[in-house]
Image (tube, rainbow, N blue to C red):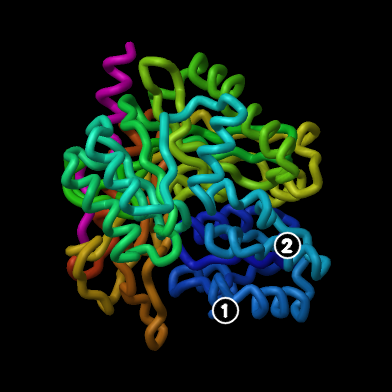
Amino acid sequence: MKILVVGGGGREHAIIKSLKKSPRVTEIFAAPGNGGIAADAVCTGIGAKDLEAITNFARENAIDFAVVAPDDPLVLGAVDLLEAAGIPCFGPNKAAAILEGSKVFSKDLMKKYNIPTAEYRVFDDMAEALKYLETAPIPTVVKADGLALGKGVTVAMTREEAVEAVKSCMEDKIFGDSGSHIVIEEFLTGPEVSVLSFTDGNVVIPMVSSMDHKRVGDGDTGPNTGGMGTIAPNPYYTEEVARQCMETIFLPTMRAMNAEGRTFKGCLYFGLMLTEKGPKVIEYNCRFGDPETQVVLPLLESDLLTVMEATTQGKLAETPVKFSDKSACCVVLASNGYPKKYESGYPITIPADLDAEVFVAGAKLDGGVLKTSGGRVLGVTALGDTLEEAIEKAYAQAANVKFENAYCRRDIGARALQAREALK
């Protein structure tokens, strides 16, 4: 089968490497792909948001199955266009992708169907939002309604920070139209858990839980990033918590979307906070997370293509989905200075005998040489029988990957190890 994967980051590289394991896959194309992905797929260079070009390419090249990975093309309706062209596609259609495309929609859905989440208010007038903040509980959370490259959320620890966040969204328009509407919500406390899930609209099959590390610096300091590393499974996500989430969040979300005529098929990401009052939804994403995918898919033992087809065809109930009981750790190597100013264009050396998976996010081929081209350059993922083994191996192997001004956090997984000890 000929497969097309839309996207060009580390997440897409992980998806492509997992799909390559399927004996039925003969060729994989990426749109646009990147310099590292080029080792595993044919990179078309077509932008992920150029839906017309993607659809034309898929039709002209007789693509048998497509996977739309990033949020933007999903929210814009890439799946609808591909399916209308007769190409089976993994991912939610435009009507369902609104679950991530609009924070206001998702919060109102949870309120309507009693799905546990933070208390909130919605504003489309800046003066009203600022007036509300005069007496609102602090800390608070300010969210742009639409997509904002994962940067549209501000956890405001002071009233001044909250005011600044509102003005940045609504007055300065730093997120464009995405900030015209905002959500101001209750600040929740507790351990965070990421749970990706396969769903065909009726059956929900959670993948291995994971823990992301968003801050750029050790000890969770510094600005937020796209993610500096992940581990799986997340020790906080116990069997009891998993049961609660299935009963109070996962299945109710599916039923709610069905009731709204927006049946969700694909990968639904649940960002959860385990509060004293039980698990609550922080956010939904309508696709695989990045870099959570880089630790979750290496643990998948089932054929990813078969699972994705079952999701698209509504046959998950009869499709085995098996994950390894090992642990995984992904250490992200970034360009020093990220997420602010950084330099790129440096050659990358990856040993051929590296005993780990490398998922490339920000690199390009220049005269046949792989060079850095982004803030997050690549992720090194290792598996182990224990979490300690996975972490130790990931760091040991990451040390063998070289490029000038490489930077990584040194404490990926430390919080998970502490949590595991505390939970004993």
Image height check: is 39 above or below 410?
A: below
- Residue nearer the viewer, 78 or 307: 78
Instruction: Please identify the quadrant where the C terminus is shown.
Output: top left
Tags 2 and 1 touching, CB below 8 Å: no
Q: Amino acid at mark 2?
A: Asp
Dot 1 crowding, Cα within 10 Å, few <14, some 14–19, many 20+: some
Q: Amino acid at mark 1?
A: Ile
Q: Residue 392 or 38: which is nearer the viewer?
A: 38
Disc 1 target residue: 46
User: In screen coordinates, is 262 left or right of 334?
Assistant: right
Report the magenta residues as a range.
406-424
- Mark 2 lies on residue: 80
422 magenta-colored? yes
| Position of 183 relative to 360 (above/below) | above
> Residue 346: percent from the left, percent from the top?
25, 76
Q: Residue 228's x, y, as percent? A: 30, 50
Figure quadrant of the N terminus: bottom right
Farthest-out residue, bottom: 367
Q: CA distance from mark 2 to mark 1?
A: 18 Å
Kindly identify the residue that appears in the image at 58 percent across and 42 percent down: 268
Q: In which image quadrant can residue 377 be found? A: bottom left
Residue 126 in the image, given as x and y percentages of width and height: 33, 53
